[in-house]
Image: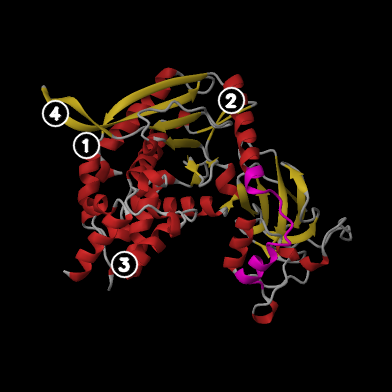
């Protein structure tokens, strides 16, 4: 029997409220299946299962605020017979066993509006729950957090995590002004021949360059643990995304170093859309191995960010500005950007962080090779 | 297509990326990016939405010509009649 725990959803999240189960006892699950939706200060998160098997018992009822690490469900490994008789769960709704069908759009709307789907009467085909049903339920809903409460809770959670990082993590800061002209020239030409739906943003180049540099200098890509530095199992770049109305999330784009710019571009657009719609997945919240924060859009020239523990590095991207620049002995106008890295000095020294920053710059000079 | 229809399509595209915008209260000359804190992803999604509704593919070099509601309607009216 495998215990399925409430996953860690980032350094600034200590608990989440179970909104609904998407699986019931007896259901077969595969690794990566979404089995529950949890509401957090940062919106609804879809919780994925890490093991294949059959759901044996659900131990937490919807509506319960649950600390990270709590056992949510028991899962039988494939072939394992049912264990002890299922324990009744206090307050567990019998509706789980006879769940109505729910349209994906309705599920998304419920996540955005904080509506408990168990309390929604389905009036769609075959009693299924539609967006209209969710909207009708809004007036009488059981809201987990109001928008202003959510924002205040986010601020408090981010503040606590950042204070802890500043207190515990010895940060070393390095920065470099990078000539971005070759990359932007390449990008303009590339986008000129692409349909609007296929165009790439400069952010995609930054994310990929960081991913490539992580593969070159793996000492910045991973986590600080009780036993010291643990390298990431892949290059999963957390992308700091500002939410409309306030707040911030930094979910991961997975395996960035091995994906093409086109794939990263599509996945980044999808990630931003889901972050703003409140439909992120637990793996995206829990496994970034490094983070990139891009404040250039705000007109900020450089940013020295606070590390998001247990990661050991965060990259700050500033605004792309035109500056006089010396190229081969002549002064030329060039588009430049300040790229910084804040690194955990316990895991990596200035030399290692510098090698990483230099690698980011080198990759940005060769956009076609990204 | 009339200017009113284009205007409606622009507002629809704009509110699809920034749902908090109230079309009734929008200053037609205000610059979207600054007024509504749009980032480059929002701008790209705005162009994609216009492409979907009007079948106009705005080249990247022309994005600046769609900075406000009035300038966007002028630009798109020109593209749609030419």
Find numbered disc 3 in the image and state the secondary structure of the residue it sits on: helix
Residue shown at 64% from the left, 29% from the top:
A160
Q: Which mark is residue A63?
A: none
**Of labels 3 and 1, the one closer to you:** 3
Extent of the magenta region: A129-150
On the same chain, marks 1 and 4? The answer is yes
- Within-10-Å neighbours for mark 4: few <14, some 14–19, many 20+: few
Question: Which residue has dot 3 on it?
Answer: B6
The earlier-in-sequence mark between 2 and 1 is 2
- Within-10-Å neighbours for mark 3: few <14, some 14–19, many 20+: many
Mark 2 to mark 3: distance in Å?
Answer: 50 Å
Q: Is residue A273 above or below residue A128?
A: above
Give how far across and how far down residue A236 sits, in percent: 48, 42
Give how far across and how far down residue A143 sits, in percent: 71, 54
Find numbered disc 1 in the image and state the secondary structure of the residue it sits on: helix
Taking the image as shown, residue A243 lies to the left or right of residue A95, namely left
Question: Which residue has dot 1 on it?
Answer: A181
Question: Which residue has dot 2 on it?
Answer: A165
């Amino acid at each position: 029997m495998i215990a399925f725990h409430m996953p860690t959803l980032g350094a600034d999240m200590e608990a989440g409220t179970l909104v609904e189960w998407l699986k019931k006892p007896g259901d077969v699950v595969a690794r990566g299946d979404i089995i529950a939706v949890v509401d957090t200060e940062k919106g609804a998160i879809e919780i994925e299962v890490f093991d294949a098997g059959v759901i044996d018992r659900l131990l937490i009822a919807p509506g319960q605020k649950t600390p990270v690490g709590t056992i949510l469900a028991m899962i039988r490994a494939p072939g394992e017979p049912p264990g002890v008789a299922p324990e009744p769960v206090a307050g567990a709704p019998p509706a789980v066993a006879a769940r109505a069908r729910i349209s994906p759009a309705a599920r998304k709307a419920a996540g955005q509006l904080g509506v408990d789907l168990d309390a929604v009467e389905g009036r769609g085909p075959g009693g299924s729950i539609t967006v209209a049903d969710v909207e009708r339920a809004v007036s009488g809903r059981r809201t987990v957090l109001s928008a202003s409460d959510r924002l205040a809770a986010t601020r408090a959670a981010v503040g606590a995590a950042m204070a802890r990082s500043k207190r515990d993590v010895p940060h070393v800061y390095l920065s470099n002004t990078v000539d971005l002209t070759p990359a932007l020239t390449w990008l303009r030409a590339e986008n000129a021949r692409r349909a609007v739906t296929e165009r790439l943003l400069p952010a995609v180049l930054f994310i990929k360059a960081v991913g490539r540099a992580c593969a070159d200098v793996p000492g910045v890509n991973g986590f600080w643990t009780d036993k010291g530095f643990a390298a990431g199992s892949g290059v999963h770049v957390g992308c700091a995304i500002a939410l409309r109305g306030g707040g911030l999330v930094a979910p991961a784009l997975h395996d960035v170093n091995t994906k093409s710019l086109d794939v990263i571009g599509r996945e980044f657009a999808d990630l931003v859309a889901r972050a703003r719609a409140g439909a992120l997945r637990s793996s995206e919240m829990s496994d970034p191995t490094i983070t990139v924060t891009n404040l250039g859009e705000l007109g900020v020239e450089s940013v020295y960010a606070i590390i998001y523990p247990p990661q050991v590095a965060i990259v700050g991207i500033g605004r792309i500005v035109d500056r006089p620049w010396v190229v081969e002995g002549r002064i030329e106008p060039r588009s430049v950007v300040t790229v910084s890295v804040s690194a955990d000095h316990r895991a990596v020294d200035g030399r290692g962080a510098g090698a990483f920053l230099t690698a980011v710059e080198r990759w940005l000079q060769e956009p076609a090779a990204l | 297509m009339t200017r009113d229809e284009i205007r409606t399509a622009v507002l629809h595209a704009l509110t699809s990326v920034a749902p908090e915008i109230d079309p009734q209260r929008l200053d037609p000359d205000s610059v979207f990016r600054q007024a509504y804190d749009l980032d480059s992803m929002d701008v790209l999604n705005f162009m994609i939405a216009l492409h979907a509704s009007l079948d106009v593919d705005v080249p990247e070099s022309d994005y600046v010509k769609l900075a406000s509601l009035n300038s966007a309607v002028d630009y798109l009216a020109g593209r749609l009649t030419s």
